[in-house]
Image (spheres, grey):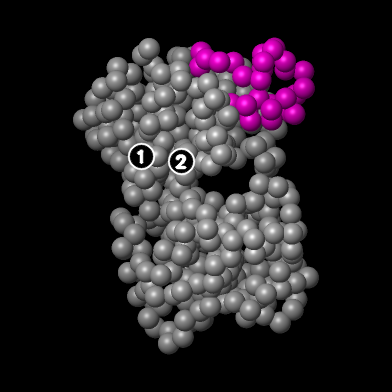
C-alpha cells in the first residue's frame, strides 16, 4: 500500500540532524511511497539532495496542513502550541517520563485523535532500542567534558567558545579538542558511568582516541547505592547511564560539600526535569549558546540534550541506517508484535494516565492493529 511520508523541518535551535537521509528517501520512493520533504535551512542535507532523489519539496513547517493520511516524521519534539494533533507522528517527544509539559503535549494528541510513535520507545522483544543516537551523544559528551576541563585548567571561560558549532566529522572534533588539551602537561582522571551502553561506549571511544583510559562503571557498580562519594575522587564525571526508574542519586548537594577533585560533570543523560534524574544538582540543561554552568565551588557542568547535533551528518546517517528497515515494515503495516506496536502501547498507556476518560480514543483493546 502506498503511504505518504512527510519529513518536517526541525525547529529546535542548532538542530541539523534528521532521521531520513536523501538516500533513504530514494529507497522509500522506489518502493512506491510518496515522500514530501519540507524545505529546511538548518538540515545537514541540502534541499537539493532530496529533490534530486525524487522527493517533493514543501514549505517549511507546512505539515500542519498536510493530509490526515500523512505520516509526519521528524526528530525532536514539536513546538509548544495549543492546536490539536491529528496526524501520526514519529519523533522524540520527551513526554513519557512525565517531563515538563507532558500533559499538555499528550492532551493535544488526545484532542486531535492523533498518534505518537516515540523513537525512544521503539524497542525489540528484549526492550532494546532499535535505533539510537547514543554512541554519538556519548562521543560528543566526552569531548565537551574534556574541553570544559581543559578550559578550567587554563582559567578560561568555556562559554566564550559559544555558540558551539557542528563538526564535519569526528576526526575534526578530536583534533579540535586535542589542540587545547596539549597545552596541559597532566591528564584528568575520568569516570564514565553507564560505560556498557551505547552512550558509554561512545564516550570511551572518544577518550581512547585522545589517549585517556577512563574508569568504567556499569549498572552493577551503581545499583542500589547513592550518593556515591567515590565519584568525587575523579576529575571528570561523564554520566551516560540510562535511568528508567527513580533511584538514589549519584550525587547530591550535600555530597558536593565534601572535599573533592571533581571539577567537571558532563551529563550526557541530561534529564534535569524528570523524576529519574540521577544528578539532582542542577535544574536546567545547558545549551549550545551557553554550554556550561558552575554548580558549586569550581565544579562545572555541561548538559546538552542534543549532543549528536555536533556531528550531524555522521549521526544522522548512522541513525537512519538503524531505523530504515523497521520503518519499511511500518509502512507495510507490519506492526503486530513489533517495535511500533510497543511504542504505541506506551503512548496509549500514558494518554490514559493523562485522561482516563478516553477509552473511545484508545479503543477496546490496548492496540489498534493497523496504522490507519
Task: Look at the picture and state if 230 lies above or below 11.
Answer: below
Q: Secondary structure at mark 2?
A: loop
Q: State the extent of the magenta-drawn residues as a range.
A: 344-372
Rendered location of residue 114, percent (x, y) = 58, 20
Q: Residues within 10 Å of mark 1 (few under 14, many from 20)?
A: some
Residue 116 visible in this rendered orientation of the protein: no
Task: Look at the picture and state if 196 lies above or below 16.
Answer: below
Q: Nearer the viewer, residue 175 or 369?
A: 369
Q: Secondary structure at mark 1?
A: helix
Relative placement, left or right, of 211 versus 55 is right
**Which residue appears at 45% of the width and 33% of the height?**
74
Q: Is residue 221 magenta?
A: no
Query: In this view, which residue lies farthest toward the bottom?
Result: 185
Task: Look at the picture and state if 187 lies above or below 307.
Answer: below
**Which residue appears at 77% of the width and 22% of the height?**
356
Q: Earlier in the sequence, mark 2 or mark 1?
A: 2
Q: Residues within 10 Å of mark 2 (few under 14, many from 20)?
A: many
Task: Indicate which disc residue 85 carries.
Answer: none
Q: Nearer the viewer, residue 234 or 298?
A: 234
Label 2 with label 1: CB-CB less than 8 Å:
no
Q: Which residue is mark 2?
A: 131
**Which residue appears at 66% of the width and 20% of the height?**
366
**Which residue appears at 37% of the width and 81% of the height?**
182
Rendered location of residue 188, percent (x, y) = 51, 79
Q: Which residue is mark 1?
A: 321
Relative placement, left or right, of 209 versus 250 is left
Q: CA distance from mark 2 to mark 1?
A: 8 Å
Q: Is residue 371 magenta?
A: yes
Rendered location of residue 77, percent (x, y) = 54, 37
Relative placement, left or right, of 317 versus 69 is left
Amino acid at each position: 500500500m502506498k503511504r505518504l511520508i512527510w519529513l518536517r523541518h526541525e525547529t529546535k535551535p542548532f538542530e541539523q540532524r534528521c532521521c531520513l537521509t536523501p538516500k533513504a528517501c530514494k529507497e522509500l520512493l522506489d518502493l512506491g511511497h510518496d515522500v514530501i520533504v519540507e524545505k529546511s535551512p538548518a538540515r545537514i542535507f541540502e534541499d537539493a539532495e532530496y529533490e534530486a532523489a525524487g522527493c517533493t519539496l514543501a514549505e517549511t513547517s507546512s505539515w500542519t496542513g498536510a493530509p490526515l493520511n500523512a505520516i509526519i516524521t521528524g526528530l525532536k519534539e514539536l513546538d509548544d502550541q495549543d492546536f490539536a494533533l491529528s496526524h501520526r507522528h514519529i519523533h522524540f517527544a520527551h513526554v513519557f517520563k512525565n517531563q515538563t509539559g507532558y500533559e499538555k503535549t499528550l492532551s493535544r494528541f488526545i484532542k486531535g485523535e492523533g498518534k505518537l510513535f516515540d523513537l525512544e520507545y521503539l524497542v525489540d522483544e528484549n526492550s532494546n532500542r532499535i535505533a539510537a543516537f547514543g554512541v554519538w551523544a556519548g562521543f560528543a559528551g566526552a569531548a565537551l567534558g574534556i574541553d570544559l576541563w581543559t578550559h578550567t585548567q587554563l582559567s578560561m571561560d568555556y562559554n566564550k567558545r559559544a555558540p558551539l558549532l557542528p563538526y564535519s566529522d569526528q576526526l575534526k572534533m578530536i583534533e579540535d579538542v586535542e589542540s587545547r588539551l596539549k597545552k596541559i602537561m597532566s591528564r584528568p582522571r575520568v569516570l564514565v558511568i553507564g560505560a556498557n551502553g551505547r552512550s558509554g561506549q561512545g564516550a570511551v571511544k572518544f577518550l581512547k582516541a585522545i589517549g585517556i583510559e577512563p574508569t568504567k562503571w556499569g549498572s552493577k557498580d551503581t545499583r542500589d547505592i547513592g550518593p556515591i562519594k567515590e565519584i568525587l575522587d575523579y576529575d571528570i564525571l561523564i554520566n551516560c547511564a540510562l535511568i528508567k526508574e527513580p533511584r538514589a542519586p549519584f550525587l547530591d548537594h550535600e555530597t558536593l560539600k565534601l572535599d573533592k577533585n571533581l571539577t567537571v560533570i558532563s551529563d550526557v543523560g541530561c534529564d534535569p526535569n524528570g523524576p529519574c534524574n540521577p544528578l539532582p544538582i542542577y535544574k536546567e540543561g545547558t545549551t549550545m549558546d551557553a554550554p556550561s554552568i558552575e554548580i558549586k565551588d569550581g565544579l562545572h557542568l555541561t548538559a546538552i540534550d542534543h549532543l549528536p547535533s555536533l556531528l550531524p551528518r555522521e549521526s544522522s546517517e548512522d541513525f537512519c541506517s538503524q531505523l530504515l528497515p523497521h520503518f519499511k515494515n511500518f509502512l507495510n503495516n507490519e506492526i503486530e508484535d513489533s517495535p511500533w506496536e510497543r511504542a504505541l502501547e506506551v503512548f496509549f498507556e500514558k494518554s490514559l494516565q493523562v485522561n482516563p476518560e478516553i477509552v473511545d480514543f484508545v479503543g477496546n483493546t490496548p492496540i489498534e492493529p493497523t496504522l490507519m
